[in-house]
Image: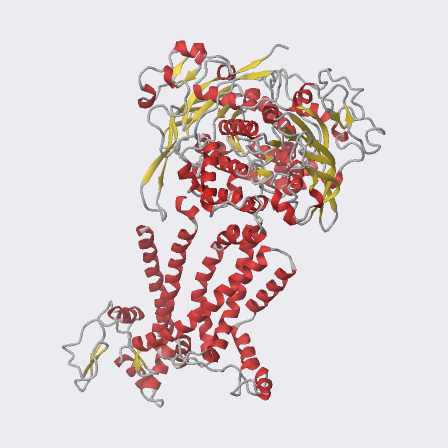
Amino acid sequence: MLIFIARRLGIMLLTAFVLTFVVFFLTNLPPNLEKLARSEGSVRMSDESVTAWIEQNGHGGSVLTRYGQWLGMVPGWVLTDEKGVTRGRCIAQRQDPAEASRFCGILQGDWGNSTFFKKAVLPSLGEKLGATGWLMLWVMIVMVPTALVIGVVSGMREGTRTDRALSTFSIASTATPEYVSGVILVALFASPVTGLSPILAEWGWIDGKTLFLGAASPDKITFWSFTLPVLTIALYGIGYIARMTRASMTEVMTAQYIRTARLKGVSFGQVVIRHALRNALIAPFTVIMLQFPWLLNGVVIVETLFNYKGFGWTLVQAAGNNDINLLLGCSVVAVFVVLVTQLISDIGYVFLNPRIRIS
Amino acid sequence: MTDTTWDPSKPILEIDHLSISFFTRLREIPAVMDFSCTVMAGEAMGLVGESGCGKSTVALAVMRDLGKNGRITGGSIKFKGRNLTTMNDEELRHIRGSEIAMIYQEPMASLNPAMKIGAQLAEVPMIHSGMSKAEAWKLARQIVADVRLPDPDRIINAYPHQLSGGQQQRIVIAMALMAKPALLILDEPTTALDVTVEAGIVDLVKDLGEKYGTSMLFISHNLGLVMDVCDRICVMYSGEAVETGAVKEVFDVMRHPYTQALFRSIPLPGADKNARPLISIPGNFPLPHERPPGCNFGPRCDYFQQGRCDAGDIPMDPVPGGDRHETRCLRWTEIDWAAPPARRAVKTKAPIGKVVLKMEDLKKYYSVSTGAFGGGMTKVVKANETLSFEARQGETLAIVGESGCGKSTFAKVLMGLETATSGSIMLFDENVQSTPIQKRNTDVVSSVQMVFQNPFDTLNPSMTVGRQIIRALEIFKYGNSDEDRRNRMLELLDLVKLPRAFADRMPRQLSGGQKQRVGIARAFAGGAKVVVADEPVSALDVSVQAAVTDLLMDIQRENGTTLLFISHDLSIVRYLSDRVMVMYLGHVVEMGTTDQVFQPPYHPYTEALLSAVPIADTKVERKRIVLEGDIPSAMNPPPGCPFQTRCRWKSKVPGNRCETEMPGVRTLAGGHQIKCHLSTEVLQQMEPVIKVAAE
């Protein structure tokens, strides 16, 4: 068990190195740095002064050295300009260069400053991640039970009318991307001019102008503001997980031990609940765990659409404003979320399925 | 739950002119036509036939579990006088499990992998008689002890995968007995099990049938087994019952050509591959939607008469003088049943040449880890221990043993799929022991080939038959052009007696026997000198088995091939092999010519193995030796002699030598080798297990 986890952790670290390097390389391409120089220095800088600015702010040199500095495995850059002022990666403003530490990278907990938000990356990322966590939690609470119920109900009697209706729904919902379903939901429920809201307002059934709110904020989580963003993300996942559960359920229902149970005289409801359910839920477990990384993906669109200031929204802002440190921070977080959920899913699978343990 | 109005002298189960069809989008496929049979209280009825003849369909129809597209289209099934065909789901639910219980072919698949054994057993009385959970578990524990499982407390708290195949089947039987049913349906209950385990299960079923007075419907393709268990038999062919009657009558005075042909195609003691070869049934089993008019067996029957046998439906005709003996044959009164078969070609035995393959002290150990995530303790599995033998040109060497005895590992090592831990394999004076198959040269690869057990999985489903054989020829670097290889492929099809037109067919268009012929053609593509046949006929029906074994023998006679025939079926081994090697837990416990091995003195394990094989001949007397317990795990073999945990002769060896000392190889008269501590005197006293009564 320990060896297995250690091996997995080793592979995870290696993957994390490779992935962060790729992101680092892409965000530190010369045009990006040029753009950074112009936004940090002056828009009207001449090409020569742009090159000088890049050199003087530690963005020169080989990519590998800079990657090492960012990681904290190579000493941070130190430069003394012609005025005798020593500046460096690890030297804070008005700090004596002699007192500053030599290494400062993400390993030392220094994730740099966001050029767009003018704040340190680490604390603001943590805050935004917390906000997204709430959103994800509610998505999971809505998505997993709904999907499992739909999957089990449609899979237990394959080919019936219920199965076809539910299958059609799942296929439709999983075939609709968030940016389509989100817009449709907003138009239907959160617009004062179209959809349901004007009719309800006219009848006097709702107090405000709209049924649900078209924007959400992490500070005020309410049913009315959270329904639409949660539903937008969950709809896609519901369809997907329900399809997987249905496939697994139909397979289990044709298994011989189900026939055994039926011919023992067990009633249909008991066959489903006592005999089929646990066996049918093993396969969807992996799928649900794989939904976590995918959720990170989904929140980018939904948070932008509903102006919810979470991780996805931050990522979009960072990318849109050439905020290199923030973008790198986001990618580190994303890489770890993906790898950790995969580890959990591998371990959980072994515990769910007693047969794996002996082979 | 017992219906009080039922009179015990009336039949328990009465199936009357039953017809069942499956409905597909294309057409209605009749699976069972005009089937009638009666099972009295306490009687055991055997249902025999080849796969696809509809015997399992009958069983499922009694349970009224034919699936969505199966429907009863005519006739009635009466259980204790009540018509099952018109019952609704709720009434059926009360009968299933409590009055009629079923035992299935694959015990592992029939038990819920995620539920404890106790919970699965206790469910039955909890549903049917409203028993409390604690009481039901107590009953489960008692029934588990009744089916002779050791340590019932541990077993009821175990999950199915923690038990062996034989134990699982005992659990399925226990589950069927939980409600003391009046009728037990057994659908090939021992097909997936080893012979010695099978013998134990059969004994158990017979005893329990007597103890509880349960009637049985026993479905099997194994005639010997049916003779052991049943009082009456019903032979089915292509959806119809063709002959029915008391077991002894049907076996001794059969009155249907199919029954006769079936008996002539199974290897009984006395059959011999040269002097009295088996007679296979010509032709193929008709597909359900392509049945011939009139008698279904007509096209394959020796006594077929045009214009009469194919004129119209044939009813069951009672055979006078018999005990409810009936046959579905128009000409049974005209046929001379005592006449010896006409087409019995006597063949000459091929000479046995020089040594082709020699193994010396071959060992194959695996190391396995026991932890859930690949960690944990490492254990050594000794799959093969000091294997030494030689095989000569033109010889058939049979390797016999139950699953887990190391016979397949041995085949893998010989083929080069695994490399041996130590020892030598000399193939034509070349040591191939540590050369894996990737590094062997084409000559060696093409001269050692294998015929696999399951012909259904070993052919590529997306390549034509001809293409697959040509592919093998390409790998063996045969011929200079595609033309050459194509010609050779057609010759190979001739060799395995398949029409040349089959070259362009896809594997799915072939029957099981035909697929196995393609497998044989592929093995012989490169002019193989040594062919390892790993249970080549065990997945095939009896009537096809005879044809495929005969084919192997013919090719061997022509090419002087050395055949290593791996099998667990002793009847077929006795029929076709020259020498036999018996394996148990990685050891060769006995080796000698077929006569030496099948006659006393035996190794105690061989003795038990021989006595466990059911023989479909009423004239054969067989001593029953049922081995207690399961085969020990190869990961944790017993000390001393590997067989000592189940040996009934152990007390005849002075001291505790069996438990402490591994017996060495002893050579008896005529080069007969045996690994046993028993003294020569005791060995001489052994009686033959199988006696053929004088005719």
Q: Residue furthest front?
A: B4
Q: Is residue B504 above or below residue B242?
A: below
Which residue occupies 64% across, 17% down? B276
Q: Quadrant of the C terminus of chain B?
A: top right
Q: Quadrant of the N terminus of chain B?
A: top right
Residue B467, percent across and down? 61, 42
A61 or A300, which lies in front?
A: A300
Please identify the quarter of the rendering in which residue B412 is found: top left
Q: Is residue A234 above or below residue B633?
A: below
A220 or A92, which lies in front?
A: A220
Display colour scheme: secondary structure
Residue B579, percent across and down? 50, 19
- The reply, left or right, for residue B168 in relation to residue B524 is left
Q: Residue furthest bottom?
A: A44
Q: Is residue B129 above or below residue A38?
A: above
- The reply, left or right, for residue B636 in relation to residue B234 is left
Residue A288, percent across and down? 46, 61
Q: How many marks?
A: 0
Please identify the quarter of the rendering in which residue B350 is found: top right
B49 or B415, which lies in front?
A: B49
Which residue occupies 46% across, 70% down? A139
Q: Is residue B164 visible?
A: no
- The reply, left or right, for residue B328 in relation to residue B46 is right
Q: Is residue B579 visible?
A: yes
Which residue occupies 38% across, 75% down? A131
Residue A266, percent across and down? 56, 48
B461 or B100, which lies in front?
A: B100
